[in-house]
Image (tube, rainbow, N blue to C red):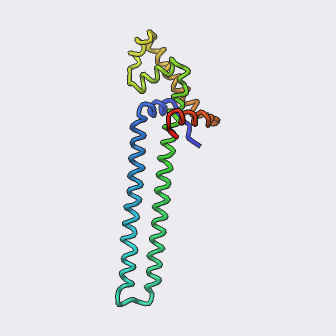
Amino acid sequence: MLNKINRKQVENILRNRAEILKRISETEERIRSQMEDEGDIIREASIPSAGASLLNDNVRKGSHHDLQDTLDRYYILTARIRKEVERQLQVLSEEKEMVFRVWVCFCTIRNSSRYYEVLYENVINDISLGSLAEKYDRTLNTISVWKRKALDMIADLYNREDLPVEVMNEFAERNNLT
């Protein structure tokens, strides 16, 4: 279940969508790279030291037990790392889903053209509300209300628990996201 979202969060996501997705992608790549590096470090730190003690001419009676302890520590450490990596990737996946879902909801309000256009021009194209008021020959207050209504429409749609899966799937197919 996704968290509820508000108007301010919607605007932030729409305004910074590309940067957010880029950051998520870079973070995912860094985590995967670190996971590989940490696995190598653990292997180098634990297994060779145990193997060297077994190859030593002065192998003591408990060497087999020492090797098993080392392997057990190795498997425990790798399991912990894997679990933490999975948790971090899950958080990033949820954030990416939030961005995707907000964008779908934004595209869904296109039928409410004046609200959509004002929001698109202001948030995506970074045109001031004053300029939009002149363009549409409306007061600044009217343009602000339209923008707020558009953001509320997106937040309400996003927060619906019964958001049709068909809407999400249709959007994904139309935009080659599947």
On the image, the x and y values in percent for residue 84 come to 47, 57
Q: Residue at x 44, y 14 (%)?
A: 140
Q: Residue at x 41, y 89 (%)?
A: 60
Q: Is residue 168 left or right of residue 71?
A: right
Q: Residue furthest right?
A: 162
Is 36 situated above or below 173?
below
Quadrant in which the N terminus appears: top right
* Label total for image: 0
Q: Residue at x 47, y 51 (%)?
A: 89
Q: Residue at x 40, y 60 (%)?
A: 36
On the image, the x and y values in percent for residue 152 come to 54, 26
* Residue situated in front as seen by the camera: 113 or 155: 113
Q: Residue furthest top?
A: 137
Question: In the figure, residue 46 lies in which quadrant?
Answer: bottom left
Question: In the figure, residue 66 lies in which quadrant?
Answer: bottom left
* Residue situated in front as seen by the camera: 137 or 6: 137
On the image, the x and y values in percent for residue 48 come to 37, 76
Is 151 situated above or below 29?
above
Is 2 situated above or below 49?
above
On the image, the x and y values in percent for residue 25 come to 41, 45
